[in-house]
Image: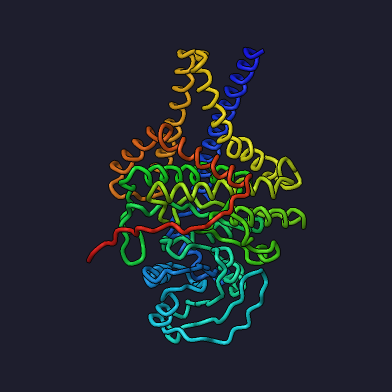
Amino acid sequence: MWLQIYYIFCYIIFGYSMAIMAGYLYFILQSYRAQHKLSIDMPDDETIKYLMKGSPLTPAVSIIAPAYNEEVTIIDNVHSLMQIDYPDYEIIIINDASSDRTLELLIENFEMVEVPYDVAMRVPSKPIKRVLKSTNPAYSKLVVVDKERGGRKSDGSNAGINVCSNKYFVCTDVDCIVEPMALYRMMWLVVNSHVPTIGVSATMLMSNGCVVGDGRVVEAKVPKRILPMFQQLEYMRSFLIGKLGWSTINALPNISGGFGLFDTDVVVKSGGYDNTSMAEDVDMLLRMVTYMKNSGQPFRIAQVPKVCCWTEGPPTLKALYRQRVRWARGLFEIMSNHRKLILNPHYGPIGAFTLPYIFLFEFMAPMLELFGYLFMIWLLFVGGINWGTAFIIFGMVYLFSVLMAFFLLYFDYSTEAVNWHNREHSYLHLLVAACLEPIIYHPLISYCSNVGYFQYITKTTAVWKPIQRQGVKKKTS
């Protein structure tokens, strides 16, 4: 009896592992296919700028950036956003009732005054107290919204949606560092699509280790510390293989809240961001897909293969733990709240393929790993491990993981998705991280996921805490 259970479990785990590897191989092939197509359809930055800058058909864009207690960096961050190269855009900074001098600094440095503004509450948010604009023409793009405390970024984003007047908006974090050509790259995919594009996901990487000057990354460097280095590799794999692969079948499941472009009208009709959600970015995109499918409208969700934005990742183990536990709770919430989409072909490739894949190989994987570790411990006590076979299997999985990383770095190198400073040195560091990741980083992330699941099931009160930023190195004159 127990021997039969043992063999059945082994076959299930073996089959599950082979399915995951097959999925990764599929994403590798699809991301290569997407990059090949984009290399034909998407010209270089200067050509895109030449074609779009003087065109009356180039859509205007609103950049929405909520801010809470950002007095240390707010002025530099706004100047950074003003460095974006695009013919027609506005910057909407939402002050979420900061208790420090964030608002005062904005008023003083950018010569802001209150202006009459008729705000239509198209999506739910805390009341807006006032809207400010600059008396200086040099800052005419800047709008500051002062609102009551919402407590989460999603409420501030909704307030920005209520104020913005453009057909498209970008939602970002106020401390992100945006590439000057980011909007051109994203909007090129919008204006050259045969069907309406309701969202564009921008490739984001970590700014940890980078050198910043004049509001932009002037030297893209790999983080020196091992924990951020693991995350950099993870971000690259997520955007350049996972999301790019999903985009080939119009099945992208997520546009990062750090930097993503959306169709304002579709977002409003979908209800905006949910301020109670732990994964508000995924939740909103799935509601947008649901709205478009239920109304019978064709749509596209695109992915930019080049880095558009840099964000500071958790620099410490404690900060990473909090972030990943929160992400795990959000994933459990998404699987629960949007379960009607899973295996439902009515909702297109996202319902038929993406969500079932996420459920089986991302949501279930940490629980199966935990059960596998416990099973291995039991086998150690009863002497039921065939060490020869075990080493072969573990070696095969480890080798596959490292080969995946080799392809990812080759992909990044050949397409120049990131223009790394001292490229050979950077890739060598990432290769070292790739060799250590399955042994050190992956078990840590699996543990955080199981903690998050447990907290969600037991309804443990979720406390959102912002990451304590350490800042980036600034280039001196």
Instruction: Tell me, yes or no, if residue 465 can be seen here.
Output: yes
Note whether 298 is above or below 113 in the view shown.
Answer: above
Dividing the picture into quadrants, the one containing residue 125 is bottom right
Q: Is residue 352 left or right of residue 223?
A: right
**Image color mode:** rainbow
| 299 and 56: which is toward the camera | 299
- As drawn, the residue found furthest toward the left would be 477
Residue at x 48% of width, y 58% of height:
465
Note whether 116 is above or below 249 in the view shown.
Answer: below
Q: Which part of the image, by quadrant, shows the C terminus? A: bottom left
Q: Is residue 404 left or right of residue 346?
A: left
Note whether 428 is above or below 252 in the view shown.
Answer: above
Residue at x 62% of width, y 12% of height:
3
Picture coordinates of residue 434, whole percent (x, y): 39, 35
Picture coordinates of residue 362, whole percent (x, y): 58, 39
Instruction: Tell me, yes or no, if residue 92 can be seen here.
Output: no
Q: Which part of the image, by quadrant, shows the N terminus? A: top right
Please count the marks in the image: 0
| 387 and 382: which is toward the camera | 382
Picture coordinates of residue 117, whole percent (x, y): 59, 84
Q: Is residue 224 left or right of residue 15?
A: left
Picture coordinates of residue 342, whole percent (x, y): 71, 42
